Structure formats: C-alpha cells, structure tokens
Image: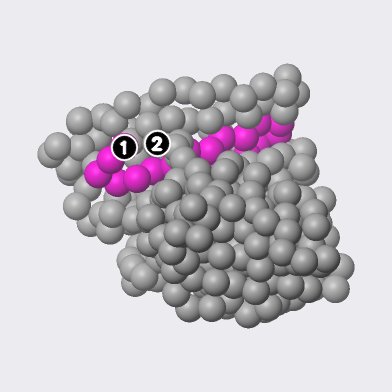
Amino acid sequence: MEKDIKIDKKINIKGLICPYTFVKSKLAIEDIEVGQALEILLDYEEASRSIPKSMEDHGQKVLKVEKINDTDWIIVVRKEKE
Amino acid sequence: MSEFTEDQLQRYSRHIILPEVGGKGQKKLLNAKVFIVGAGGLGCPVGYYLAAAGVGTIAMIDNDEVELSNLQRQIAHSVKTLGKPKVESAKNTFESLNPDVNVIALKQRISKDNIMDLIKDADVVIDGSDNFPTRYLVNDACVLLKKPLVSGAILRFEGQVTTIVPGEGHCYRCLFEEMPPAGLVPSCQEAGVIGAITGVVGSLQAIEVAKLILGKGDVLKNTLLIYDALKTTFRRVKVPKNPDCPVCGNNPTIKELTDYDAGYCSVR
C-alpha cells in the first residue's frame, strides 16, 4: 500500500540537525499544494521522531516513517492545510 | 517562493517553525515597512525587536540627540552615542543586530506638513512619542490615510497600549476626543518613569505590529491595555468606536491636519 503514495516533492536534509531539519521540511511543505506529498530523506535520528510529531502538530498528515538503512530515514508527509 | 539564505534560515528559524509565521510569514516581515515616531523609551525597544524580527524597512523620526539621562531606559543608545542624533544611534544599533534591515533615520520634527508624505508608504505606524500634540497629529494622519497605528504611552509605573485600525475600530480621539490642556498631564521629565516599563510597553507594541503584518491573532482593536507595574496587573478596557468622533466618526469635522502645537509649550 505504501508503494501507492505519489510523491510530489523530495528533499534531502542529510547532515542537518534540529531545528533546521524541521525548518527545511516546513518550508518544503509550504511550497506544495494541499493534498500533495513531501518525501524527506534525513540522517539525524532525533528528527525522525520530532519531524513527524511537529508535522502532526501543524495539522499535516504523516504517511510514512521508515528507517531505510543504518543511517537514513524517509518520512512522507501529506499536506492537509496551508 | 524565493529562497532564504542559509544565514536567514538560522536567524529566523524560531519564527519559521511557528505555525503562525512560517516561511511565508517571515517573507511578509522582510517585505514590511514600518514608521516609528520617536527614538526614545518606546521607539528603542519597538525598533530593536522589529529589527531582530527582520522587518525589512524601519523608518524612524526624532529630532533629539542622545543625553545621559536617556540611558536609564532608551536601550538602543549608549555612552558611545551621547550627543549624536537618536535616530543615528538607533540605526547603528539595529543594523548591527540585523543587516537584513534597512533603517531610515530621519532627524527632524514630525509635523502636519511632513507626516502625510512620510507615512504614506508604511504598512504600520508606531507612536512612541512623549507629547500630546504629536500623539493627536499621528492619530489624525493615520485615520486620514487609513494606516494601522500601534500607540504606546508610559508614565511613572503605568503603561498603555492600543492598536488603531482605521475603518475597523476606534481611534485615539474616540478614547480622548481632545488634548488635555497643556501642563495638566506631567511629562516623564516632570514625573519620572521606571526604566523597564519602556521595554514592557515597547515589546507589546512590537508584537502588535508583527501580528498586523502577519495577519494573525487579535490586535488591541477597540481596546486599551493598561499595565500597572506597581501592582503587576494588566487591564483591558473596551473602547467603542465613537460615531461622533471628530476624525473617524460618521460626520468628521477634522478633514485635514491642523496646528497641533497651538497653546502648547514647546515639548521636546
């Protein structure tokens, strides 16, 4: 089912730490339309927990949080509101 | 949307992560133009925080020079700028804090002859003046030009803040229709002022300005906020728009700016 998620924008924020992980993610969300999905590639573990929480707090929908290898995570967020 | 520089991402990160601001709100702040009347007790903290917030253009008018007696509360000035124009002193301070900001320093007196031209491009006007003729002049000009005005006042241990949105809420004359007679209300020079109250009131004004620029939250429209520093209380007083107000009422008698200094001793 996850394979069906259509990604409209991807960002790579590897190397960034908090709060810039969320700053970049939030700016990217602002750039897409409601209903579109953003894929975030990151390697800062704390952000793999804090970004989904912050996105939900801001009213967005977290579709996926997945550790893809030893160092990296992928988070997919659907924009629900401006 | 246009990109932020890496420096800007860091500088404004705590704004950008706020739901009410974000990148779009920060761009609004960067593109905003404000006009501050007075570079004294209130003008210093208002300008300081708006500069920190990245408000792109901050024009400031004041005709005074920095004196030692100012430094008890006017935090943009210093012993290094004693004797220099306050607006130049403040400009240096604000631009040192944030080079994104363009500070326009106007060393002159604001008057009925220059105010309309000076504020015509401003998104928000801030009154941090210390005298009634200026307060009424700024109010009337803002009502005539339909400019939002964030007005602050301080004396002794008391501060007041109100936000005037012409066409939507009250104006200063709805609150106090005419100026008090000269000499009735003492000035800070005569009555004193506790230094940090300028920071409380000026910071409240800066947040009102930010909310107006962002279009978020509720500003002090139809409301006067009174801060009593001795009791540590904030009181909100309802100020209805007066339909008979001489400047913003249904049949205004003030349709152009008049001589506001008449009958007033020269107030610096």
Q: Report the amino acid beneath label 1.
A: Gly
Magenta segment main secondary structure: strand
Task: Please tell me whether mark 1 sits on a helix, a strand or a loop.
Answer: loop
Magenta span covers which residues?
B152-169
Percent position of residue B48, x then y: 67, 61
The answer to whether dots 2 and 1 both sit on one chain is yes
Residue toward you, B143 or B31: B31
Q: Which mark is residue B169?
A: 1
Where disc 2 sits, the SS reads: loop
Residue at the far right in the pictured view: B79
State which tag comes first along the sequence, 2 or 1.
1
Q: Is residue B248 left or right of residue B92?
A: left
- Residue B116 lies, with reference to residue B88, above or below; the image says above
* Relative side of B100 to B32, left or right: right
From the image, tell me which residue sits under label 2.
B221
At x 39%, y 43%, the residue is: B164
Tag 2 subunit: B
Mark 1 belongs to chain: B
Q: Please name the residue shown 70% across and 77% down the image.
A: B7
Q: Position of residue B32 (x, y in %)?
A: 46, 67
Q: Locate residue B53 relative to residue B25 in the image: left or right.
A: right
Give yes or no for residue B158 being in the magenta stretch.
yes
Q: What residue is at 23 percent from the left and 56 percent from the top?
A: B256
Report whether residue A9 is seen: yes
